[in-house]
Image: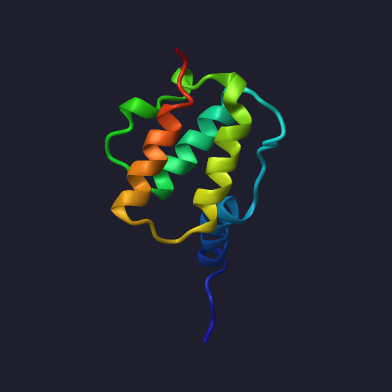
């Protein structure tokens, strides 16, 4: 059986971003906040993300956002109660 080299390249491109963390989360930047929020909402499969806009997050609470991100990325499944608690916790990180 022969394989199509182009097919292998396409698979690599689709998998590579998930396996590579090119974002330096040690730096508190607007781009990192946007990345973290995007990854959290994607992992939780959230539809209504209006309350979690990156620009509404208090950058002084960045470390807390990173902790939430790390916890979310470690789990594969969330109960409705856990999802609600996460949304509430992220809501507490918003600018006043």
Q: How many marks?
A: 0
- Residue at 58% of width from left, 25% of height from top? 61
- In this rendered view, identify the residue nearer to me: 66 or 46: 66
Q: What's the coloring here? A: rainbow
- The residue lying furthest to the bottom in this view is 1
Q: Position of residue 13 (x, y in %)?
A: 56, 54
- In the image, taking residue 44 as reference, residue 13 lies left or right, namely right
Quadrant in the rendering for residue 16:
bottom right
Q: Position of residue 60 (x, y in %)?
A: 61, 20
- In this rendered view, identify the residue nearer to me: 78 or 43: 78
- Residue at 53% of width from left, 19% of height from top? 58
> From what the image shows, is residue 18 above or below residue 22?
below
The quadrant of the rendering that contains the C terminus is: top left
- Residue at 52% of width from left, 71% of height from top? 4
Q: Position of residue 64 (x, y in %)?
A: 58, 34
Q: Position of residue 36 (x, y in %)?
A: 53, 36
- Residue at 40% of width from left, 28% of height from top? 91
- In the image, taking residue 73 as reference, residue 77 lies left or right, namely left
- In the image, taking residue 11 as reference, residue 78 lies left or right, namely left
> From what the image shows, is residue 92 above or below residue 43?
above
């Amino acid at each position: 059986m022969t394989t199509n080299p182009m097919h292998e390249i396409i698979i690599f491109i689709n998998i590579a971003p998930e396996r590579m963390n090119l974002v330096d989360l040690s730096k508190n930047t607007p781009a990192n906040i946007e990345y973290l929020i995007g990854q959290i909402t994607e992992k939780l499969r959230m539809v209504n993300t209006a309350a979690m806009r990156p620009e509404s997050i208090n950058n002084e609470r960045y470390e807390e956002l990173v902790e939430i991100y790390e916890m979310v990325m470690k789990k594969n499944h969330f109960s409705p109660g856990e999802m609600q608690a996460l949304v509430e916790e992220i809501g507490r990180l918003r600018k006043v």
